[in-house]
Image (cartoon, rainbow, N blue to C red):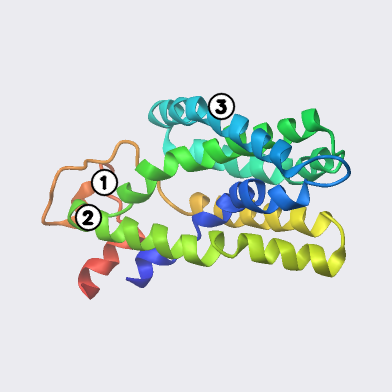
């Protein structure tokens, strides 16, 4: 079970919760109402409904790892500009920040995971393995984001620690993806031998949980 949860997939989700939860309070000041920030989030989410399927198409064409790694780099790069835009307290700039965080950075990291994470496990362990990894990753990295963000801002009174927090999340996820294997061409049919699921015959880490189970 430990092998299924050891990869830190979820830090790249930090910008999502930063934008959709923490920013609702952070961005609402100096004449900008909470409703304006919420409207920006809703607009960005609407655009993301189109970019997530598009990103998934890229995953099928170029592979899961390349798209995920591009998303991690984009997440780290956008960390500081996101708060620069929000700190202008201008509605158009806030919308631009949300468009940067959700339909671009979040879509690039979120869309591939639905295929990439389950494919790292043998077919007979795919549901439990990916479910444990995804849920524990969410509990450890995603759920605390609003609380950590509020604590950082309360301690430093500036946005740069929040940006660094996003950068760290992007770097952690990039490393996790970089040391994983590409799963696009895997054979997903049921096999009694988990090692046979990869077309190149390589063995992946998560298969070791079969012995423990």
Q: Real-space Cα distance between discs 3 and 2?
A: 40 Å
Q: Residues within 10 Å of mark 2 (few under 14, many from 20)?
A: some
Residue at 32% across, 49% down = 118
In the displayed image of the protein, which residue is found farthest to the left? 192
Q: Marks 3 and 2: CB-CB under 8 Å?
A: no
Q: Quadrant of the C terminus?
A: bottom left
Q: Could you tell me residue 167's position as x and y percent? A: 70, 52
Q: Which mark is residue 167?
A: none
Circle 3 sits on which residue?
47
Q: Real-space Cα distance between discs 3 and 1?
A: 35 Å
Q: Marks 1 and 2: CB-CB under 8 Å?
A: yes
Circle 1 sits on which residue?
198
Q: Residues within 10 Å of mark 1 (few under 14, many from 20)?
A: many
Q: Could you tell me residue 157's position as x and y percent? A: 87, 62
Q: Is residue 90 above or below residue 166?
A: above
Q: Residues within 10 Å of mark 3 (few under 14, many from 20)?
A: some
Q: Could you tell me residue 29's position as x and y percent? A: 84, 47
Residue 192 horizontal side relative to residue 85, left or right = left
Label 1 residue SS? loop
Q: Is residue 7 visible?
A: no
Circle 2 sits on which residue?
195
Which of the 4 image quadrants contains residue 36? top right
Q: Quadrant of the N terminus?
A: bottom left
Q: Earlier in the sequence, mark 3 or mark 2?
A: 3
Q: Real-space Cα distance between discs 1 and 2?
A: 7 Å
Label 2 residue SS? helix
Q: Is residue 207 visible?
A: yes
Residue 209 horizontal side relative to residue 94, left or right = left
Residue at 70% across, 39% down = 35
Q: Nearer the viewer, residue 50 or 78?
A: 50
């Amino acid at each position: 079970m430990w092998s299924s949860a050891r990869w830190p997939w979820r830090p790249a989700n930090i910008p999502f919760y930063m934008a959709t939860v923490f920013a609702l309070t952070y961005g609402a000041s100096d004449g900008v109402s909470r409703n304006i920030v919420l409207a920006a989030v809703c607009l960005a989410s609407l655009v993301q409904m189109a970019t997530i399927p598009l990103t998934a198409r890229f995953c099928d064409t170029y592979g899961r790892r390349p798209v995920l790694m591009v998303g991690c780099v984009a997440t780290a790069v956008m960390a500081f500009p996101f708060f620069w835009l929000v700190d202008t307290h201008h509605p158009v700039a806030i919308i631009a920040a949300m468009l940067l965080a959700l339909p671009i950075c979040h879509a690039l990291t979120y869309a591939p995971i639905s295929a990439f994470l389950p494919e790292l496990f043998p077919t007979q362990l795919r549901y439990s393995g990916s479910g444990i990894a995804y849920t524990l990753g969410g509990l450890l990295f995603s759920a605390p984001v609003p609380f950590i963000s509020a604590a950082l801002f309360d301690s430093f009174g500036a946005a740069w620690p929040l940006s660094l927090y996003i950068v760290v999340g992007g770097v952690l996820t990039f490393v996790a993806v970089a040391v994983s294997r590409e799963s696009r061409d895997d054979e997903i049919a049921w096999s009694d031998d988990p090692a046979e699921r990869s077309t190149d015959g390589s063995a992946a880490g998560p298969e070791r949980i079969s012995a423990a189970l």
